[in-house]
Amino acid sequence: MQKTEPLIHGNYYHIYNCGINGEALFRENSNYEYFLWLYEKHVTPVADTFAWCLMGNHFHFLVRIREVNEMAAPNNPDRVPNPVRVINTKPPHQYFSNLFNSYTQAFNKKYSRHGALFERPFKRKLIDNKGYFRQVVVYIHQNPVHHGFCEHPGEYGWSSYNTCVSNKPTRLERSVVLEWFGKKENFILLHEESINLMKLEEYLEIEQHYS
């Protein structure tokens, strides 16, 4: 059995998972919206988000787990200014588990189903090679293209691509992402180019049905 990658403060991770046995996670727009609302509630206080994409039966996030003194206080999505200490912090993975458990309970109630909804444990891959940051962002945003939902990432509504190219206020770490690409024009250009999908999935340890 493959060892689960621990989530460590200060590290970057590709977080991804799919519905159990490939079951749909999102059946209608309200499901996507509610999942993102729960993500904001449970995960945003403890992690910086750089890219995300929600698909019908799976999802992808690129995050950095904040250092303890960067984490937000309970029920406050804003960061706690240094050097304020956060007392009784839970292990980082627990915040993600709380998200998935909360969503599963609401989903099961709405659709009169029972049991687990997500595969366990949720998948995570440490991204410690700076050369892969840009590629992981492009990979996440191109997921809908790979699956034939659209011809360009900007045509898909449930990803962070359009947030990255807009000027609207956001909690996404947009400025950092654009710095990785040099400038917005490069960000757009590289999303229009093809990437070595098989090589990147091999590095990310992603099975084909997670693409």
Image (cartoon, helix red, strand yellow):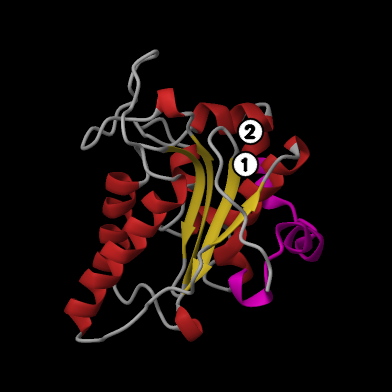
Q: Residue furthest top?
A: 83
Q: Which portion, as a residue range, is magenta?
A: 189-211
Q: Dot 2 corresponds to which residue?
A: 185
Q: Is residue 4 left or right of residue 155?
A: right
Q: Position of residue 159 (x, y in %)?
A: 46, 54
Q: Quadrant of the N terminus?
A: bottom right
Judged from the image, the secondary structure of the residue bearing numbered disc 1 is helix
**Kind of residue indicated by mark 1:** Ile
Where in the figure is residue 174, as x and y percent of width and height?
Answer: 49, 32
Provide the residue designation for mark 1. Answer: 188
Q: Position of residue 47 (x, y in %)?
A: 44, 39
Q: State the SS at label 2.
A: helix
Q: Image height check: is 26 above or below 171?
A: below
Q: Indicate the position of residue 19 as horizontal and vertical percent values.
A: 45, 76
Give the image quarter of residue 190: top right
Amino acid carrying label 2: it is Glu
Taking 19 as reference, is 158 above or below it? above
